[in-house]
Each structure stands twice: as structure tokens, then as C-alpha cells.
């Protein structure tokens, strides 16, 4: 399966000065951020590819640290849903 990289950041020349002001970025700052993110996305796993391995600390039902860990490889062959958020 071949998948094309989708660029989700509009080119800087398509944005107005008001757009940059709203983002609180200069044109140069936006361009640098966009270039960095596009380069990083080139090495991200594609749909259907194996996800990279990782280990997370498990939290209790109340959000407290448990000291227990979860490795993605423990769920091999089963669906996994990850919920990211700020719990501070």
C-alpha cells in the first residue's frame, strides 16, 4: 500500500498578515515551524504500518501514578486505543 504524505500546513505565501498575527508567528517563524513538521512527518508511521514500540506508565482510575507500565507489544494482534490529555 502506497500512501502519499498529506501536507496539512498551508504554504506561507497563501496566508495573510492577519493570519500570522492570529497565530502569533512571523512569516519566517511559521515557515521554519512548517518545514520542521513536514520533515518530521516524513518518518512517521503510515496507515497499515506497524507502530513503533513504546512503554507508558499506567494511571489509576483517579489519574494517580501506579508505577505499573504498559508496553505496546503486550497488545500485539489486538486493537489499541490511546487517549492523550493533560491530567495535571
Image (tube, rainbow, N blue to C red):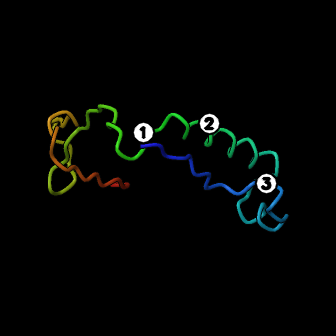
Give the residue number, with chain letter if any, for mark 2. Answer: 39
- Between 85 and 40, the one lying in front of the other is 40
Q: Is residue 48 left or right of residue 6?
A: left
Q: Earlier in the sequence, mark 3 or mark 2?
A: 3
Q: Earlier in the sequence, mark 1 or mark 3?
A: 3
Residue 36 x, y percent position in the rendering:
65, 38
Residue at 15% in and 46% down: 78
Residue at 47% in and 43% down: 2
Q: Is residue 15 left or right of residue 71?
A: right
Label 3 secondary element:
helix
Give the residue number, with chain letter if any, for mark 1. Answer: 45
Residue 66 x, y percent position in the rendering:
15, 41
User: In the displayed structure, would residue 76 be above or below residue 64?
Assistant: above
**Quadrant of the image occupied by residue 86:** bottom left
Residue 84 x, y percent position in the rendering:
35, 53
Label 2 secondary element:
helix
Residue at 70% in and 57% down: 10
Give the residue number, with chain letter if any, for mark 3. Answer: 12
Q: Do residues under tags 1 and 3 come within 8 Å of each other at their CB atoms?
A: no
Amino acid at each position: 500500500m502506497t500512501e502519499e504524505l498529506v501536507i496539512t500546513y498551508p504554504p506561507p505565501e497563501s496566508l495573510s498578515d492577519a493570519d500570522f498575527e492570529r497565530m502569533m508567528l512571523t512569516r519566517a517563524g511559521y515557515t521554519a515551524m512548517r518545514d520542521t513538521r513536514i520533515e518530521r512527518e516524513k518518518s512517521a508511521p503510515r496507515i497499515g504500518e506497524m507502530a513503533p514500540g513504546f512503554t507508558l506508565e499506567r494511571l489509576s482510575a483517579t489519574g494517580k501514578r501506579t508505577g505499573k507500565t504498559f508496553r505496546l507489544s503486550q497488545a500485539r494482534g489486538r486493537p489499541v486505543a490511546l487517549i492523550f490529555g493533560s491530567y495535571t
